């Protein structure tokens, strides 16, 4: 549209485009931006609502959980696996640190330590508790292994029966279709055996 | 076309027709509509699918008046429909089994098209609209299955929505957006109900486009050749209205028998256990009509990496998702993969065999999908998946070039009118374009 109709007398010709092209373009762009601005609230309304986000922290008392016991608590509608590991399990996890894994991560980094130089830190050196989100990173099933007698897979941690993912004693994926380790939720120690998840 | 007063009937009909030529239109498209004279019973399944759609909408509407889309109420409200609502058990069993029969009918309809080359010019858009209807049906059925909020509802939804987490970078956010939370929960159930209610009406709209495209050139036929003139066609009414009605009667007998005597045959008992977010059923399976796709999803249990470098390009999870959606994308691309000018499998001696092998392959995939994802079943699913893709990407394009079709009859009417089924024309000649 470099040549406008010669309706008004002299032909309008400009370099690279006419005034009308410019007006079409800017009006069109403004229209598109405006539409997008109006559509966004519709799309965003489908995102998790504020009450769902606010439900986002739970306090857990770990004191009744003996060595080799496991408990499951709910956080954001998902199960959280808490396992009181024995030394053998921790050593197995640390010994495997250098193995080639699908999602390499040292065991130490998967454990939240109490803040250093606090009474809590002094009381819980090297926390023996492993806290992970109990949702298989493949397609979201709940792995087995929390209850006594359930299969724990080839690496002694958890086993997801849906498509056969094996997690080790640090909750790391070792075998099967899941791409990632069981997630570690954000949590902190409030007291020696009291954590706040979320 | 209307104003020349072709519509017979009362003065009122004429008065309306002059202003809105709807009677002329109906007459033109459902009475006179010239249709090939040689359609077999395989051509019944289109109108059958339309009737099942109406049955689904009718039963769905009354179910929706009793159903409560809330995670604390949904399961019990469905049980209430089954026990207390007058005739509720019947309505729900019709709706539940109707979904299965819908897929049976549509899958037969699709395979009919595959065998007789109904996707070939000039019917590509008709075919594409059909693939779109299939996708919409899958979405509708998937979300409907979530509504009773049993164990399979919850865990099926969890596994399938989690597929989207395979998308690089934005996957997790997309999944939370789909859920409206951090797991499949009440907001998810709520929106699934809304979409389950809405999508069937979208399907109705696409069905109209599908029929519009169909009536542009009319039905294909078992010979796959174009009609040469009026002698090759007969009016739709009464010939095919009667044939469709007869087929409908047979269908309804089978449907009623299953609804009455085996209403849970195609369902899964775990869905009569209320949803529990803490316990995954030991063996999650989708409804039978998704099994072939589920098998392809699970067949990719390996990462795709650059050889010897260990650099993963496509993780197994994403690979499975791509393969599953790719299997439907291939269906959409079919008109451009099979370039053979001969439509009907009757005149394609080699294609015919590969067609049946492909049909068998789909059944094998379905069976693999119903089995646990272990050992031999994974390998079988991998082979069958590979074959599925080879069929579309290698066999059909190659057959288009290499196969020598049998001679085509000169016209639809000729073998019938001459009474002997003798085929004119000794050499294979390419399809005439409409
Ligand atoms: C394309 C058509 C449709 C298909 C394929 C379909 C499929 C399904 C399926 C598979 C179920 C689960 C049945 C069960 O296991 O209990 C279901 C449930 C349901 N559908 Fe549909 N549906 C369709 C149309 C509709 C429409 C149009 C409505 C409403 C206007 C509707 C309302 C419902 C309701 C309320 C339920 C929950 C009650 C129940 O589970 O029986 N459906 N649908
Ligand atoms: S969901 Fe756990 S292996 Fe697939």
Image (spheres, coloured by chain):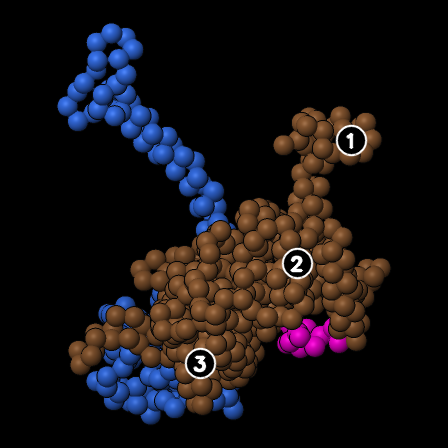
Label 3 and label 2: CA atoms lie apart by 38 Å
Is A46 located above or below residue B285 in the figure? Answer: above
Identified at 54% across, 72% down, the residue is: B346
Q: Nearer the viewer, residue B118 or B233?
A: B233
Residue A179: quarter of image = bottom left
Sequence-first disc among 1 and 2: 1
Q: Which numbered mark, 1 or 2, is in the foreground of this view?
A: 2
Q: Which residue is at the front of the view, B215 or A150?
A: B215
Q: Are marks 3 and 2 in contact (CB under 8 Å)?
A: no
**Horizontal placement of A114 versus B321: left or right?**
left
Which element type, helix, strand or loop, lies under badge 2? loop
Q: Secondary structure at mark 3?
A: helix
Q: Are marks 1 and 2 on the same chain?
A: yes
Crowding near the residue tagged with mark 2, few <14, some 14–19, many ≥20 C-alpha atoms within 10 Å: many
Disc 1: host chain: B
> Left or right: where does residue A89 sit relative to residue B87?
left
Query: Residue, x 61% and y 62% (percent of image)?
Result: B414
Q: How many marks?
A: 3
Magenta segment boundaries in residue numbering: B262-278
The circle drawn on residue B13 is 1
Tag 2 residue: B37
Q: Position of residue B209 (x, y in %)?
A: 56, 47
B221 to the left or right of A46: right
Alpha carbon of mark 1 to alpha carbon of mark 3: how far? 58 Å
Would the CB of label 1 be found within 8 Å of ligand 1? no
Residue with the most extreme right position = B86
Chain that is brown in the image: B
| Residue displayed at 74% across by 51% down | B237
Chain A display color:
blue
Q: Main secondary structure of the magenta part?
A: loop
- In the picture, the disc for residue B384 is 3
Q: Earlier in the sequence, mark 1 or mark 3?
A: 1
């Amino acid at each position: 549209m470099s040549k406008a109709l010669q309706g008004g007398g002299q032909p309008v010709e400009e370099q690279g485009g006419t005034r009308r092209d410019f007006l079409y373009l800017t009006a069109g762009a403004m229209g598109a931006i405006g539409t997008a601005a109006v559509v966004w609230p519709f799309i965003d309304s489908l995102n998790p609502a504020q009450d769902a986000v606010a439900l986002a922290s739970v306090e857990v008392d770990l004191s009744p959980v003996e060595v080799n016991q496991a408990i499951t608590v709910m956080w954001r509608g998902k199960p959280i696996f808490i396992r009181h590991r024995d030394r053998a399990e921790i050593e197995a996890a640390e010994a495997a640190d250098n193995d080639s894994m699908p999602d390499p991560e040292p065991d130490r980094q998967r454990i939240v330590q109490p803040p250093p130089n606090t009474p809590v830190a002094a009381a819980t050196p090297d926390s023996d508790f492993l806290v992970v989100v109990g949702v298989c990173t493949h397609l979201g099933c709940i792995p087995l292994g929390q209850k006594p007698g359930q299969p724990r897979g080839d690496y002694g941690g958890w086993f997801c029966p849906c498509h056969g993912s094996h997690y080790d004693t640090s909750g790391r994926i070792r075998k099967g279709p899941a791409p990632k380790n069981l997630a570690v939720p954000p949590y902190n120690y409030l007291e020696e055996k009291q954590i706040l998840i979320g | 076309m209307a104003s020349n007063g072709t519509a017979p009937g009362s003065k009122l009909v004429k008065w309306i027709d002059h202003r809105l030529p709807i009677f002329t239109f109906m007459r033109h498209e459902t009475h006179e509509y010239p249709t090939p004279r040689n359609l077999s019973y395989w051509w019944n399944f289109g109108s059958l699918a339309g009737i099942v759609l109406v049955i689904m909408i009718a039963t769905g509407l009354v179910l929706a008046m009793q159903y409560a889309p809330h995670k604390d109420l949904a399961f019990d409200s469905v049980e209430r429909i089954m026990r207390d609502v007058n005739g509720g058990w019947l309505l729900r069993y019709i709706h539940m089994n109707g979904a299965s029969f819908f897929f049976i009918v549509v899958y037969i309809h699709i395979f009919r098209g595959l065998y007789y080359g109904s996707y070939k010019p000039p019917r590509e858009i008709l075919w594409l609209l059909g693939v779109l209807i299939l996708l919409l049906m899958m979405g509708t059925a998937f979300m409907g299955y979530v509504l009773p909020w049993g164990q399979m509802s919850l865990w099926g939804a969890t596994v399938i929505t989690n597929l989207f987490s395979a998308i690089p970078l934005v996957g997790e956010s997309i999944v939370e957006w789909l859920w409206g939370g951090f797991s499949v929960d009440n907001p998810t159930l709520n929106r699934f109900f809304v979409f389950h209610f809405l999508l069937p009406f979208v399907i109705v709209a696409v069905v109209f486009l599908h029929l519009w495209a169909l009536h542009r050139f009319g039905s294909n036929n078992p010979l796959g050749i174009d009609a040469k003139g009026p002698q090759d066609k007969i009016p739709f009414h009464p010939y095919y209205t009667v044939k469709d009605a007869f087929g409908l009667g047979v269908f309804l007998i089978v449907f009623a028998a299953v609804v009455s005597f085996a209403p849970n045959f195609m369902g899964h008992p775990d869905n009569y256990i209320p949803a529990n977010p803490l316990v995954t059923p030991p063996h999650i399976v989708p409804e039978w009509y998704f099994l072939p796709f589920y098998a392809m999803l699970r067949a990719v249990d390996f990462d795709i990496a650059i050889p010897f470098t260990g650099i993963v390009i496509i993780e197994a999870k994403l690979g499975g998702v791509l393969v599953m959606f790719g299997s439907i994308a291939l269906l959409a691309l079919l008109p451009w993969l099979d370039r053979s000018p001969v439509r009907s499998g009757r005149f394609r001696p080699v294609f015919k065999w590969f067609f049946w092998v492909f049909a068998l392959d789909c059944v094998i995939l379905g069976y693999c999908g119903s089995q646990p994802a272990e050992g031999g079943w994974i390998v079988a699913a991998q082979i069958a998946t590979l074959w599925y893709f080879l069929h579309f990407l290698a066999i059909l394009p190659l057959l288009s070039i290499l196969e020598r079709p049998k001679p085509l009859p000169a016209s639809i009417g000729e073998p019938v009118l001459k009474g002997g089924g003798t085929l004119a024309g000794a050499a294979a000649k390419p399809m005439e374009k409409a």
